Amino acid sequence: MMTKKYYFILFIPFILIGGCSSEDDKTTPEQSNTERLFDDQRKVLEKAKEVEQMLQINMNNRMESVDEYEQ
């Protein structure tokens, strides 16, 4: 009889603590773990594409200036 009473007393704090959670703990259904895993890589890839585009524009401008200089 005494052990049941102690079990009850021990498990009440665990139940109360488990029931308290913040909104930050909940994951959004539209973004899974694998999507969050690759977010940083996507950002780096987008940045690399922007840099590549800037380099391409710069190269085209230089080629135009060289062509104008040769004429």
Image (cartoon, grey):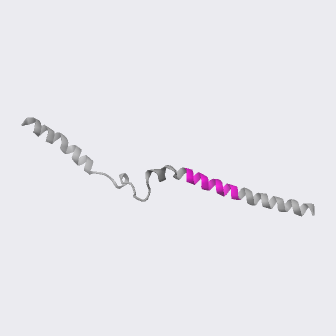
Name the residue at 27% across, 51% down. 20
In magenta segment, residue 47: yes
**Outermost right residue:** 71
From the viewer's perspective, tell me whether residue 23 is left or right of residue 67: left
Quadrant location of the C terminus in the rendered image: bottom right
Q: In which quarter of the image is the N terminus?
A: top left
**What's the magenta region?**
41-53
Tell me where residue 12 appears, x and y as whole percent: 18, 45
Queried whether the magenta region covers residue 6, the answer comes back as: no
Q: In this rendering, would 31 be left or right of 51? A: left
In the picture, measured across the screen, residue 56 lies left or right of residue 16, that is right
Say above or below: 67 vs 6.
below
The secondary structure making up most of the magenta span is: helix
Residue furthest to the left in view is 1
Of 36 and 65, nearer the camera is: 36
Question: To which quarter of the image does residue 11 belong?
Answer: top left
Q: Where is residue 65 in the image (x, y as percent from the top left)?
A: 85, 61
The residue drawn where x is 79% and y is 60% is 60
Number of numbered discs visible in the structure rendering? 0
